[in-house]
């Protein structure tokens, strides 16, 4: 295959002028089906059909590298990591044995050790996996099997009704994990948070006592470092004190906020994370690594292997002098991508200092946007800005009821999306529709943020 056309296409995409392009060219589902020309024919289409389909995919996709995309907890483009995706696929290996993936195994082992030490785990362990939803699940699995090792062979029936505790603003992955692991969603106990969406330690203790009185067996607490909606950070140390009092495993869900560990200015928001039993973290969020790049980190290096898998197959895992480097034994997956390469190459390119500057810039941009919103009498800040989440709405301080205000804000957001002007998300805070703007793209500047606010204002004001 002649790759010159592909590289020309990629170079054009990478170097395009964002001031002359949209976040997306919106199409309805029916229009998208027609645009993609989905039918697969018997006769080979060759390079012509192949490259045409690539171009159709690109024109039919949201450009998440565009400075006016702020819809998710990730944005922008990381070129070293982007290139490493191609390198990973070029070698197309799986990180389960040193024999099949010698370089990848050493890189992943190094990255896990480095990340553990950054989080304060001197003798830690961990693994790369398919997102923090799975990392949270693995933390529950390791906690359960460490505290109740007989469950691994005998099942949940050998124990009383196990339950665990998360914030009322925790990620929805915990309900999914409870379903997968057999705890049942009713045994995910949501703990009350304060007005800033931070879990209240006294409420955690009350919930634990109540669960015990109801005949349940608590075993796990999760604190959140960077909630999805507000970017709030739970008081980890205070929650850990409660968890220790009742001999409970303490996990920190740092999927979104864990990146602050690389910022000397802002890592105080993670105070206490070093005393967690486990931590989940997504490098594909604020670090800008292409999806997926996630880890689960354990403070005690002796816990992951026996909790996850000790039974292996001799067709894959053989006894040899380096069998402690056969990383597949510590994963519930078999085939596993070399996601560590993306993170390692990015650190090699940017260095620790480069990432610190990136993170500090994002927090600074969130602060700038917050000040702009506060200075505009037509906007209302709906939550305290702690991290890179800015929550606000258009509110002209006129006699408009809640339903009307929600509709105005939602309509303006949808209009900007369908016109390809910008893409940002929304959530509800006390029934108020909040524009949830995420600062995760290091290429965003003040003028672009000003443009988004002004355009949003214009869209809203026309509806009054």
Image (cartoon, rainbow, N blue to C red):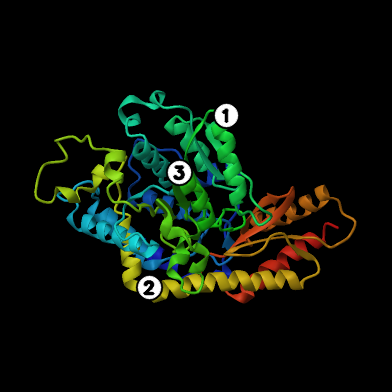
The residue carrying mark 2 is: 352
Q: Residue at x 64, y 74 (%)?
A: 368
Residue placed under numbered mark 3 in the picture: 248
Residue at 48% from the left image edge and 43% from the top image edge: 246
Tag 1–tag 3 contact (CB < 8 Å): no
Q: Earlier in the sequence, mark 1 or mark 3?
A: 1
Q: Is residue 227 above or below residue 147?
A: below
> Which tag, 1 or 2, sits closer to the chain's start?
1
Q: Specify the label residue 214 is tagged with.
A: 1
Q: Examine the image and state in which quarter residue 139 appears.
A: top left
Which of labels 3 and 2 is toward the front?
Answer: 3
Observer able to see residue 8 = yes
C-alpha separation, residue under disc 3 versus residue under disc 2: 34 Å
Query: Percent from the top left, x then y, of residue 456?
Result: 72, 63
Q: Secondary structure under badge 1?
A: loop
Q: Name the residue: 38% across, 24% down.
A: 158
Is label 2 in a helix, a strand or a loop?
helix
């Amino acid at each position: 295959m002649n790759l010159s056309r592909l590289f020309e296409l990629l170079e054009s995409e990478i170097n395009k002028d964002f001031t002359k392009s949209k976040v997306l060219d919106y199409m309805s589902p029916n229009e998208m089906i027609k645009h993609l020309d989905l039918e697969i024919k018997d006769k080979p289409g060759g390079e012509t059909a192949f490259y045409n389909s690539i171009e159709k995919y690109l024109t039919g996709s949201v450009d998440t590298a565009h400075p006016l995309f702020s819809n998710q907890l990730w944005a922008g483009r990381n070129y070293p990591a982007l290139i490493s995706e191609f390198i990973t696929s070029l070698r197309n290996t799986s990180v389960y044995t040193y024999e099949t993936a010698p370089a990848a195994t050493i890189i992943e082992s190094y990255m896990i050790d480095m990340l553990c030490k950054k989080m304060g785990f001197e003798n830690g362990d961990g693994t790369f996996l398919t997102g923090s939803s799975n990392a949270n699940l693995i933390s529950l699995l390791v906690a359960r099997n460490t505290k109740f090792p007989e469950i691994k062979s005998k099942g949940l029936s050998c124990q009383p009704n196990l339950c665990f505790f998360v914030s009322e603003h925790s990620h929805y992955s915990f309900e999914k994990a409870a379903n997968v692991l057999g705890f049942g969603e009713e045994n995910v106990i949501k703990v009350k948070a304060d007005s800033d969406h931070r879990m209240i330690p006294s409420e955690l203790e009350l919930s634990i006592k109540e669960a015990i009185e109801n005949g349940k067996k608590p075993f796990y607490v999760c604190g959140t470092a960077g909630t999805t909606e507000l970017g709030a950070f739970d008081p980890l140390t205070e929650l850990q004190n409660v968890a220790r009092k009742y001999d409970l495993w303490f996990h920190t869900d740092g999927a979104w906020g864990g990146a602050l560990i690389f910022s000397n200015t802002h890592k105080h928001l993670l105070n206490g994370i070093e005393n967690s039993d486990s931590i989940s973290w997504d490098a594909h969020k604020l670090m800008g690594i292409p999806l997926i790049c996630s880890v689960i980190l354990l403070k005690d290096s002796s816990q992951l292997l026996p909790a996850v898998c000790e039974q292996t197959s001799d067709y894959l895992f053989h006894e040899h002098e380096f069998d402690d480097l056969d990383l597949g034994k510590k994963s519930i997956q078999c085939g596993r991508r070399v996601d560590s390469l993306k993170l390692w190459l990015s650190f090699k390119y940017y260095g620790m200092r480069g990432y610190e500057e990136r993170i500090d810039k994002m927090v600074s941009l969130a602060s700038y946007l917050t000040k702009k919103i506060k200075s505009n009498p037509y906007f209302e800040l709906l939550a305290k800005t702690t991290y890179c989440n800015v929550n606000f709405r258009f509110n002209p301080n006129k006699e408009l009821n809640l339903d009307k205000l929600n509709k105005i804000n939602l309509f303006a957001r949808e209009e900007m999306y369908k016109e390809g002007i910008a893409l940002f998300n929304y959530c509800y805070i006390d029934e108020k529709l909040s524009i949830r703007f995420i600062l995760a793209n290091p290429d965003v500047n003040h003028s672009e943020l000003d443009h988004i606010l002004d355009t949003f204002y214009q869209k809203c004001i026309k509806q009054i």
